[in-house]
Amino acid sequence: MHSHVENKQDTKSQAAASAGAQEQNTGGSALQVVDHRPETIAQRRLREISNNTPQTTQLRAYRKAANNSPEIKQSAQTAGIIQRVLINIEGYEGPQLDTEEEGMATIKAYLRQLIDDHNEEGILRLIEQIVQEDVAKLPEITAYRREYQEQLMAPVPQADDATHLSEALGSPVGQRTDHAIPPSIHRFWSGGPLSESALETMLEASGKTEGTPWAHTLWYSRNFEEGIKKPWALFGQEGTDYRADQSKITKRDAQRRQLIESGYNIRAIEELVAEGPSTSGVTADELNLASGMAANSVNAGRGYDDLKYFSDIARLMYLHAEGGHHMDVDIGLGDMDMHQQYYHNDAGGQVPLLGTLARDMTIEGGGQEVAPHLVRAKKYRDNPYSGGVDEAQYREAVTALASRSKAGAGMYNALIASQPGTVNLQAAIDRIMRSMRKENPAERTLSTGMGANPELLAGVRGGEGYNERLDVGAAASVPPYLLRLEHLTEESQR
């Protein structure tokens, strides 16, 4: 470690003293005495060699340029002093670290490298040198360090997620702008009340879209809820109502009022068939039959599986009619960018965005495999510099989640986003309604909507290149906000 300090006042004094000494030695005479002793000659040669080394020449040129700069001359005139400090840091290799203006650029570049490398020890050594040698420069360096680190800690924008997803899939994600998906979120829930966690998720969603064009709708089936009324008999009178489950119904209705107050539209799916099947792809008779089957299953004590299958029909109906983003009640918006318009990834605007990563938190449901990748991705994008996850780990997580989303496109339907009236949506509706349209009424059944996912990805089954269309469609189904959603909430484990 060394420092080099120049002082203009000292230089002037030294020059004056030197001039006086010359006058005394010469006595005004031209006579000069030259010392030819061997030791003096040797010292003179060593001095000449030292003065002509590349390092000394470079330093002399640097001093000359610095002392002739307008800033230095102005400083000399106003302050009467010029000070330049050359800092030498252990282990540093590179241009001289000079605390003058040009040298400060080198110091800042060195500081950036130390910060990029998370070299806290090196940063402290540099700061210590500045404190020891030129403490007046410390505020500038400290401010620069803070500003640069704040830049590095800035959250990763969603567009960067989309770029990395595109690279992982070899297919564009979030790059097109020609087939817009309406900014609306649809959910379906019918029968009893929502769980508290699902209600909280939905209320948070409406709060996150406040002041944006996004709309929220909760759909239910009026026919189903009429169909599950239980019979009663009292004082010789008989009827059907919710008296057996009145507390549940009271709670459900209160929840719906709360959702309306937060901006939700509460709508019956039966609205979509009032003017025929052209809008929803389903006739009124077909819808009534499906809701009746779901209600009968509940009344017979067989549980709510048929209602789940009915909800699969409902989500395709309202997407076909109005378009938008269907999300199950347990999917939270997380930090999805709600100020952005979303589009289909495929050129034809037929493949919906899907992107369900897991069914639940069980091993079978895939949640335990997915959750660690979601956590790592969020840590990095929230704070890329000091979030505890580096870029390589983040990219690894993105790649794993992209692959999982593509594979899940053939199975899951908790998230579906599309423009209205697409060929693929109609093909999916026709597929799921095949079991409902059998000629023999005894053979009619409700079937899972997951069986219609191939139609969502590739349209009508079969034909030349069908398998390729499935693969391309699966890649095109990954949404740009995949990493942002809350896929695994408390409700996912129910």
Image: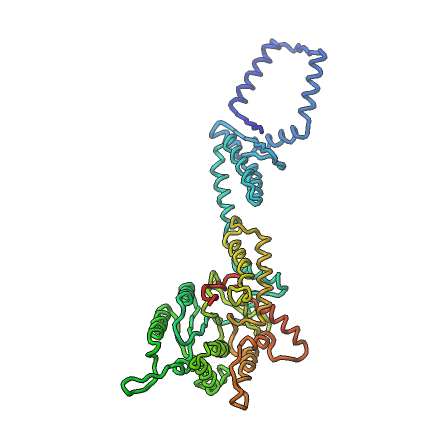
| Residue 41 shows up from this direction | yes
Q: Quadrant of residue 480?
A: bottom right
| Residue 318 shows up from this direction | no
Q: Position of residue 357 (x, y in %)?
A: 54, 65
Q: Position of residue 488 (x, y in %)?
A: 49, 63
Indicate the quadrant containing the N terminus: top left, top right, bottom left or bottom right.
Answer: top right
Q: Position of residue 239 (x, y in %)?
A: 33, 86
From this view, report whether residue 17 is shown above or below residue 417. above
Tell which of 355 and 56 is nearer to you: 355
In the image, what residue occupies the spot 51% across and 70% down?
414
In the image, what residue occupies the spot 53% across and 32% down?
129
The reply, left or right, for residue 109 in relation to residue 291 is right
- Colour option used: rainbow
Q: Position of residue 441 (x, y in %)?
A: 51, 89
Tell which of 136 and 202 is nearer to you: 202
Tell which of 194 and 314 is nearer to you: 194
The reply, left or right, for residue 8 in relation to residue 244 is right
The reply, left or right, for residue 42 in relation to residue 69 is right
In the image, what residue occupies the spot 42% across and 63% down?
208
From this view, report whether residue 445 is shown above or below residue 469. below
Tell which of 213 and 61 is nearer to you: 213
